[in-house]
Image (cartoon, rainbow, N blue to C red):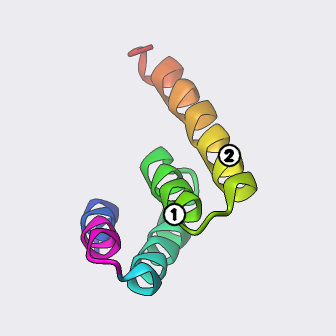
Amino acid sequence: MEVGDLLKLAAEARQAGNNAEARRLLDQALTEAPDHPGVLNSLGLLALGEKDAARAIGLFERAATLEVLFADVLGTG
């Protein structure tokens, strides 16, 4: 399954209150694309919802750093 599809399904699961399914889908996406800012951001949102602020901050920081790096490489930043 494509990473974008996994992100969409994970968001739907999280919105439906099924955090376990959201985590499973996001873990699968992370395995396929460990440096994908969207995956990291989604994991950060899940961690925030689980009251794990320290983990959420780390994930958000990593996502933001990678987003900037990708923008520089692609010339879009």
The stretch drawn in magenta includes residue 13: yes
Question: Which secondary structure is most common in the magenta stretch?
Answer: helix
Identify the residue shown where x is 51% and y is 32%. 67
Identify the residue shown where x is 57% and y is 33%. 64
Q: Which region shows up in magenta?
A: 9-17
Q: Name the quadrant of the N terminus.
A: bottom left
Q: Could you tell whether 39 is left or right of 68 in the image?
A: left
Identify the residue shown where x is 75% and y is 53%. 54
Q: What residue sits right under mark 2 in the picture?
A: 57
Pointers 2 and 1 in contact (CB under 8 A)?
Answer: no
Q: Residues within 10 Å of mark 2 (few under 14, many from 20)?
A: some
Q: Is residue 53 above or below residue 16?
A: above
Of marks 2 and 1, the one in the foreground: 1
Number of the label disc, if any, that sits on residue 13: none
The stretch drawn in magenta includes residue 35: no
Q: Residues within 10 Å of mark 1 (few under 14, many from 20)?
A: few
Q: Is residue 4 above or below residue 61?
A: below
Instruction: Give the farthest residue toward the right.
Output: 54
Q: What residue sits right under mark 1 in the picture?
A: 49
